Amino acid sequence: MEILNGKTFSAEIKAKVKEDVEEFCKNHKTPLLACIIVEGNKASEIYVASKQRACEACGLLSKVVRLPEDVTQNQLEKVISNLNEDESVSAILLQLPLPKQLDSNRAINAISPEKDVDCLTNQNLGKLFAGNSNFAPCTATGIIKLLERYGIQIEGKNAVVIGRSLLVGRSVASLLEHKNATVTICHSKTKNMEEIIKQADILVVAVGKAHMIGADFVKEGAVVVDVGINRIDEKLLGDVDFENVKEKCSYITPVPGGVGPLTVACLMENTLTLAKLQASKNLK
Ligand code: NAP
């Protein structure tokens, strides 16, 4: 069994982004990532702080727009509209989840597709699912890069993705399918999930239920990617029971130190990608 070390690989990706940013900045303004955070979610605060640190490490600019917990939909969309218009902003990230009074889907689709760094607007998702997008949601991108970094073959494999959010499950399923895996998506209404999971050569779990996948579920020699982040008694646990499952699989991501750091590294890459696309458009 080999650990898929997202922490080490994310450092490599960020070092390459830093080099590319330096090159880009010889002829263009420094790309800026704007993160919108609605207050009241401790985990979101931690994620946004780590995204800011990563920007600094990669030579990218960042700014955080903080909104109170009781912000209205109109106020949020006005902030997004201002960032869309602001030429100093290359990329916009709306930190999810949002409080209950807000419609996430509407807010995401208020972001200009050209600045939609997590590739979540309907327009960008349409391109992604059609297989003609220049970029993809950060977590899904990170997972594919990690598999490829370790030389894991995707083509022809049975891949099972548990979870069907646009942010993770459906976008990683689409990327796996474009890489010629045969993909099954499971969700909360799936029947006989255990039988389906046992067929998986590559298993991606993105649910948000601590240790829901035990060793009994997993096929001998499978590659297991654990996207879940569950905070239990101040500890971070994945959706996979790592200690037991690791004995059975060929590769596995730890939590923490697996998919999480790659999401941040791919966010840096996507920020630069958007800045480059905007620069090439301005030349036409
Ligand atoms: P989400 O939007 O809540 O989606 C969860 C999915 O899990 C849904 O599709 C749901 O099915 C499915 N599900 C729930 N209970 C299930 C069950 N018992 N069996 C099978 N499927 C079940 O969550 P998300 O945004 O995709 O995030 C999932 C997890 O990944 C969370 O722990 C989150 O914190 C973590 N995450 C990590 C990163 C990272 O960088 N590592 C990034 C993003 C998210 P239905 O559609 O039927 O409701």
Image (tube, rainbow, N blue to C red):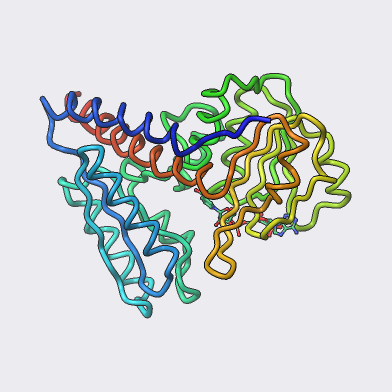
Q: Residue at x 55, y 64 (%)?
A: 231
Residue 27 place in picture, x, y as percent: 11, 25
Q: Going by the image, does 241 lie left or right of 106?
A: right
Q: Is residue 232 above or below residue 18?
A: below
Residue 116: quarter of image: top left
Q: Residue at x 41, y 29 (%)?
A: 134
Residue 282 place in picture, x, y as percent: 18, 30
Q: Is residue 9 above or below residue 210?
A: above
Q: Residue at x 65, y 20 (%)?
A: 153
Residue 24: quarter of image: top left
Q: Going by the image, does 198 lie left or right of 236?
A: right
Residue 74: quarter of image: bottom left
Residue 240 place in picture, x, y as percent: 69, 50
User: Which is more toward the observer, 152 or 181?
Assistant: 152
Residue 148 place in picture, x, y as percent: 55, 23
Quadrant of the frame with the N terminus: top right
Report the image quarter containing ligand 1: bottom right
Quadrant of the frame with the C terminus: top left
User: Which is more toward the observer, 258 or 170?
Assistant: 258
Q: Going by the image, does 87 lie left or right of 204?
A: left
Q: Going by the image, does 10 lie left or right of 79?
A: right
Q: Is residue 32 above or below residue 272?
A: below
Q: Is residue 209 above or below residue 261?
A: below
Q: Residue at x 67, y 19 (%)?
A: 155
How many numbered discs? Answer: 0
